[in-house]
Image (tube, grey):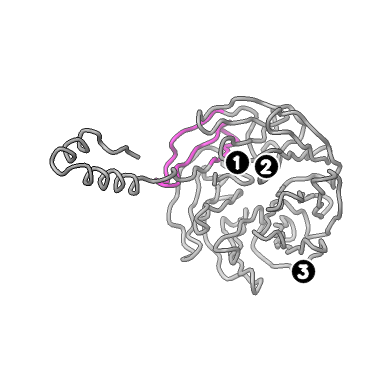
Amino acid sequence: MFPVNYRHASSRLASGIHTILGNKAVAIYIATAFLSTPLAAQPFAYISNQLADSVSVIDTATARVVDTIAVPGKPAGIAVAPDGKHCYVSTPEAKGFAVVDTTKREVIATVAVNDGTLGIAVGPDSKRIYVADWYKNTVSVIDANSLQILSTIAVGESPSGLVVSPDNRWLYVANRISNSVSQIDLKTLDVKRTAQVGTHPFGLTIDARGERIYVANVQSDDVTVVETARMKPIATVKVNMLPYATALALNDSRLLVTNQDDGSVSVIDTETLKEIALIKVGEKPEGVSTHPDDRHVYVANWFDGNVSVIDARTLKVIDTITTGEGSRAFGQFISK
């Protein structure tokens, strides 16, 4: 699978309480109603359905699809801005990406970038978008406000997965054909260092402190752990067949890896760097992302057109949500 492939307090009831019990009771009632009201809605998961030219919106509170957004161009990569206002979707056949307004739940802009768009990421400050060109071996840097390309950076062959460091200083790029990961300095916008990893790296993730990168290597069936300070591999962990993408959970103590060819997710203990569980999910699992609660992990299953929800504590699938044909969701697809 490559580029194309809550209620307000009732004023009427408050008035009645005021009449019977006085101002003090009203104050207590309103305060209680306010405290019992959720301060924010639960996050949403945005799942690209490549074969259906759409994005499914999952309300994670109810584990149900609440909307489906038409996104032409065979949508693949997903990057939800940390500020929650936009979701960026790479569209390989449209040679760019679509901008989805998460409030309106509709495409409000399309941006032409290059012929091989796939991997896409957004900086922690939501100000820049990064798009990998699978064919031209570059990464484009786009201003999120103007949607203009600021720079184009040469990297390794067939760049795919992208991730930005938590401090917004570095961009890491998995180069599939070069078997490497590029580290880009986001101040100078050039490649600082390159680390050799396993065979055909694809998806990658970074820990909360920005100290380690975990890289899924599709052809060598393993995960390379890279120390960012020196950009050197410190371990290789064997998983199952055709690992595609990775996500961290439980305070970065667990790494979950989607294995495409056997419909499973490997769970790695990040302290011992050993596989501790293998969880069956749907067919051809691809994208994987962790809910902000740091416990529930969502897995997009390409062949089944659905999403498996894993409890990272019990290591069990607790729900399966039907989405659309060709669910990929490659990237950070859950809002914060």
Residue drawn at x 73%, y 33% is 143
Q: Residues within 10 Å of mark 3 (few under 14, many from 20)?
A: few
User: Foreground residue, 75 or 163?
Assistant: 163
**Amino acid type, label 2:** Val
Could you say which quadrant of the image residue 303 lies in?
A: top right
**Amino acid type, label 1:** Val
User: Foreground residue, 104 or 274?
Assistant: 104
User: Most extreme residue toward the front, as rendered?
Assistant: 23
Picture coordinates of residue 87, whole percent (x, y): 59, 36
Alpha carbons under labels 3 and 1: distance apart: 30 Å
Q: What is the secondary structure assignment of the residue under circle 1? A: strand
Mark 3 and mark 1 lie on one chain; the one further toward the N terminus is 1
Q: Is residue 59 above or below residue 172?
A: above
Q: Residues within 10 Å of mark 2 (few under 14, many from 20)?
A: many
Q: Is residue 75 above or below residue 28?
A: above
Q: What is the secondary structure assignment of the residue under circle 3? A: strand
Q: Quadrant of the N terminus?
A: top right
Q: Residue under label 2, please give it.
A: 122
Of the numbered discs in the image, which one, if any, rests on residue 234? Answer: 3
Alpha carbons under labels 2 and 1: distance apart: 7 Å
Of the numbered discs in the image, which one, if any, rests on residue 80? Answer: 1
Mark 2 and mark 1 lie on one chain; the one further toward the N terminus is 1
